[in-house]
Image (cartoon, rainbow, N blue to C red):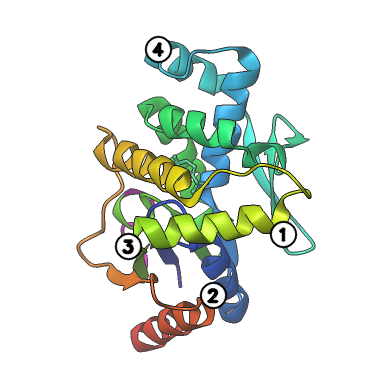
Amino acid sequence: MNIAIDGPAGAGKSTIAQRVAAVRGAIYVDTGAMYRAMALFMIRKGIDPKDTEAVGEACGDADISIEYRNGEQRVLLNGEDVSDEIRTEAVSAIASTTSANPKVRQKLVLLQQALAKKTDVVMDGRDIGTVVLPDAEVKIYLTASPRARAERRYRQTLEKAAPGQEIPSVEEIMKNIEERDYQDMHREHSPLRQAEDACLVDSSDMTIGEVVDRILAICDETA
Ligand code: DC
């Protein structure tokens, strides 16, 4: 069974998808990490992320692959493990732009489809239910209000911050989230939207455990 989980940034997709995958004995695939690795490649090459032609041409030289170490997904860019380096705000911002490039999408969608053919996956992203796995047995559109997502991100940042380190306010984080949502939902190619046959789960007032249980129940109903 393939399970597609789509939704905006900060809705909790990766945490939830990982737990669902563990219970169902499936492989978790974080497609956002692939788009982030591609963004890092463009940053390193000094390519303007808005230059459609240059990004489209350069993406052919980026070999992106996925490996699992101790059950954790690692993303390799031309053989180098970049899993930690892709988690910065700078990469997030550039990834939102370069992921709108049709050549980038074409390349990564093929890779994602090949992974799902080999094994049962729980795949999270923006276009999994609509484009990558239109025949997935279960499709979830996981969302939460911009404020709920910003508050979660704020708490996570605070937990990881060094003593005395300045961190952005909830309002600032919310502004970034809303900007990124707008970009992801209004791009020309594969914009973020709920697939017609996807189940909507709004996690604003739910705990992680409740969301996981809800999705597992949907899987059981489908099986
Ligand atoms: O989920 P994330 O924040 O790691 O995703 C990084 C960027 O990649 C984000 O701007 C949306 C984009 N993305 C996409 O266009 N399609 C996907 N399937 C996954 C992510």
- For marks 2 and 1, give the CA distance: 14 Å
Whichever of callouts 3 and 2 sits on the residue coming sooner in the sequence is 2
Q: Going 42% across and 28% down the picture, which residue do you hit?
A: 97
Mark 3 vs mark 1, foreground winner is: 1
The residue furthest front is 164
Whichever of callouts 4 and 3 sits on the residue coming sooner in the sequence is 4
Whichever of callouts 4 and 2 sits on the residue coming sooner in the sequence is 2
Q: Which residue is mark 2?
A: 20
Q: Amino acid at mark 3?
A: Asp
Residue 174 visible in the displayed image: yes
Whichever of callouts 2 and 1 sits on the residue coming sooner in the sequence is 2
Q: Amino acid at mark 1?
A: Glu
Mark 4 crowdedness (10 Å alpha carbons): few <14, some 14-19, many ≥20: few
The disc at residue 72 is 1
Left or right: where 79 falls relative to 201? right
Q: Which residues are magenta?
A: 131-137
Left or right: where 86 falls relative to 31? right
Whether label 4 touches label 1, CB < 8 Å: no
Q: Position of residue 213 (x, y in %)?
A: 47, 85
Q: Is residue 135 magenta?
A: yes
- For marks 3 and 1, give the CA distance: 26 Å
